[in-house]
Image (tube, rainbow, N blue to C red):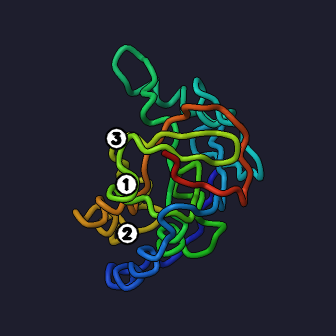
Amino acid sequence: MLVQETISHKTLQELEAGLHEILAAPKQKGELAMIVRRPEKLEREELQEGELNEALGLVGDNWLARSSEGSPNARPEPDTQLTLMNTRAVQLMAGERVRWKLAGDQLYVDLDLSKENLPPGTRLSVGSAVLEVTAVPHTGCKKFVERFGMDAMIFVNSPTAKDLRLRGMYAKVVKPGTLKVGDIIQKIS
């Protein structure tokens, strides 16, 4: 179960002041800093190693069940299989690393996730797997506001922040494989 202690959230001014650090993220090749599996609603398991597969996404994650619930005909939306978040952005909003997983994403990477750098269709290798960036926008929700504050929601949903994908982005598995914390994540042609 996710436990959230009372914490003061950063102001919009504090978040905007940290934007320069996010903009300095590597563009071609970065590092996978954290893997988080969501086995049940409101549960998070930090992994050192994970398995990605084309049907399930991150093996052991509840994406398939959650994705099927909200979609027409109870079919999963493959373009929302995985969520990636920039480590510099989550660090700015969440602070301590132990709070990163509250964002609800699965892969936390030190890489420029902007639409300009990673347009839909871009492929990324991480470990022995290959991902493809999808066009579905990833936005904050009520839980994001509860965990990081309304100013964080405003920050990630500004037009500039949406182009930078400060809330993260969706991807799907196109080649299954194993990934580990510390693996290189990089754009491939």
Look at mark 3 in the image and give the residue it sits on: 136
Q: Give the percent coordinates (x, y) of residue 7.
A: 53, 75
Placement of 92 over or under 54, stated as above or below? below
State how far apart marks 1 and 2 are (Cα): 9 Å
Q: Secondary structure at mark 2?
A: helix
Q: Who's the residue at 32% across and 84% down the image?
A: 13
Is label 1 in contact with label 2 (beta carbons under 8 Å)?
yes
Question: Which mark is in front, 3 or 2?
Answer: 3
Q: Is residue 84 left or right of residue 43?
A: left
Q: Give the percent coordinates (x, y) of residue 68.
A: 46, 23
Q: Who's the residue at 60% across and 66% down the image?
A: 99
Look at mark 2 in the image and give the residue it sits on: 152
Q: Secondary structure at mark 1?
A: loop
Q: Is residue 177 left or right of residue 140?
A: right
Residue type marked 3: Val
Residue 140 numbered mark, or none: 1
Give the mark nearest the N terminus, 1 or 2. Answer: 1
Placement of 94 over or under 163, stated as above or below? below
Give the mark nearest the N terminus, 3 or 2. Answer: 3
Residue type marked 2: Ala
